[in-house]
Image (cartoon, helix red, strand yellow):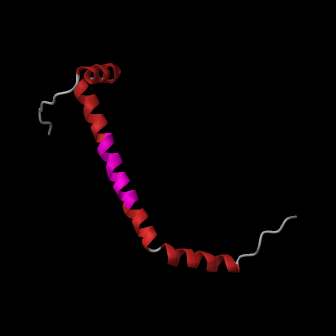
């Protein structure tokens, strides 16, 4: 469901929005798409930050496991 709302924008920003929106449809549709993309990117960034924190919490153990695996691998040899 769409809800009509009102916002106040600087004239120069509105002019840029209108120029970008013209080939793609209405001003409202353009702003909605931009905001939808922005919100999606924020969610992805939050998920990435959570993953990064998890990896950092377990980094010492994961690095030790990786070092252990490398000990069992054949060394690279120049041919």
Image coords of residue 46 (percent x, y)? 34, 56
Q: How many numbered marks have been drawn onto this rendered protein structure?
A: 0
Residues in magenta, as a range = 37-49
Residue 38: in magenta span: yes
Q: Is residue 21 above or below residue 40?
A: above
Is 73 on the left-hand or right-hand side of 43? right
Task: Pick whichever, 23 or 77, lies toward us.
Answer: 77
Q: Residue at x 52, y 75 (%)?
A: 62
> What residue lies at 15% left-to-right and 36% top-to-bottom?
2
Image position, residue 78 (x, y; %):
85, 65
Instruction: Give above or below for 11 relative to 32.
Output: above
Residue under the image location 29 percent in, 35 percent down: 33
Which quadrant would the N terminus be assigned to in this image?
top left
Measured as percent of width and height from the top left, residue 69 is found at 63, 78
Q: Quadrant of the C terminus?
A: bottom right
**Residue 28 rendering spot, x and y as whole percentages:** 22, 28
Between 72 and 15, the one lying in front of the other is: 15
Q: Give the main secondary structure, helix, strand or loop, of the magenta stretch.
A: helix
Residue 31 falls in which quadrant of the image?
top left
């Amino acid at each position: 469901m769409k809800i009509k709302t009102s916002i106040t924008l600087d004239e120069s920003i509105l002019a840029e929005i209108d120029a970008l929106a013209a080939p793609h449809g209405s001003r409202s549709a353009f702003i909605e798409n931009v905001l939808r993309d922005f919100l999606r990117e924020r969610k992805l960034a939050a998920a990435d930050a959570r993953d990064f924190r998890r990896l950092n919490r377990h980094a010492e153990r994961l690095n030790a496991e990786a070092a252990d695996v490398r000990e069992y691998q054949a060394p690279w040899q120049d041919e």
